Image (spheres, helix red, strand yellow):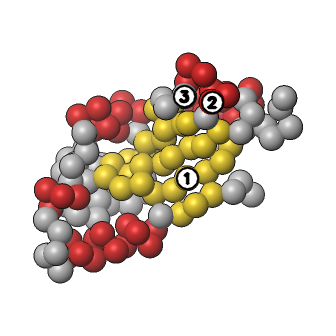
Amino acid sequence: MRRHVDYALARRAVLRELRKGRLGRHEVCDAQVELVRAARNVGEPAGADCPVCGSAGLVLVSYVYGEALRRANGRCVDATELATLDATHSEFARYVVEVCPDCRWNHLQRRELHGRRDAV
Ligand SMILES: [Zn+2]
């Protein structure tokens, strides 16, 4: 099992604050243009509806970070690119962001460590 950090608690806390009116919708539905574009282009179905607007268009977008990735560092990748990086690079981190292109809700879902640890 890959080491990973789950942000479900933080997500639930944000949604709770939103329901109680302590956070405005504009504060949680603030995805940048670039993130919304990535969601439309390479987002993978999240398997759940948007927790804010109920849209079925909720997707997951992955970003990878790691010095070993060089040019790919900080890039948004799809599943195929992720598999390639996994096989060819030493440790790097993948951040999975949940994004709703309809209302622009976005939240970090989890952070995973990837790559070949035995790579030099
Ligand atoms: Zn939404």
Disc 2 secondary structure class: helix
Mark 2 and mark 3: Cα distance apart in space:
7 Å
In this rendering, the answer to whether 71 lies above or below 31 is above
| N-terminal-most mark, 2 or 3 | 2
Q: Which residue is pictured at 25% across the width and 45% down the height?
A: 31
For mark 1, what is the residue? 111
Mark 3 and mark 1: Cα distance apart in space:
15 Å
Where residue 70 sits: x, y (%)? 60, 22
Tag 3 and tag 1, C-beta contact below 8 Å: no
Disc 1 secondary structure class: strand
Give the residue type that dot 1 points to.
Arg
Q: Is residue 108 visible?
A: yes
Where residue 13 sits: x, y (%)? 34, 74
Q: Is residue 54 visible?
A: no
Tag 2 and tag 3, C-beta contact below 8 Å: yes
Pick the quarter of the image with the N terminus.
Answer: bottom right
Where residue 17 sits: x, y (%)? 24, 75
Q: Quadrant of residue 84?
A: top right
Judge by depth and name the residue closer to the eye, 40 or 109.
Answer: 109
Judge by depth and name the residue closer to the eye, 34 or 79.
Answer: 34
Label 1, ligand 1: CB separation under 8 Å: no
Q: Residues within 10 Å of mark 2 (few under 14, many from 20)?
A: some
In this rendering, the answer to whether 82 lies above or below 25 is above
Label number found at residue 67 = 2
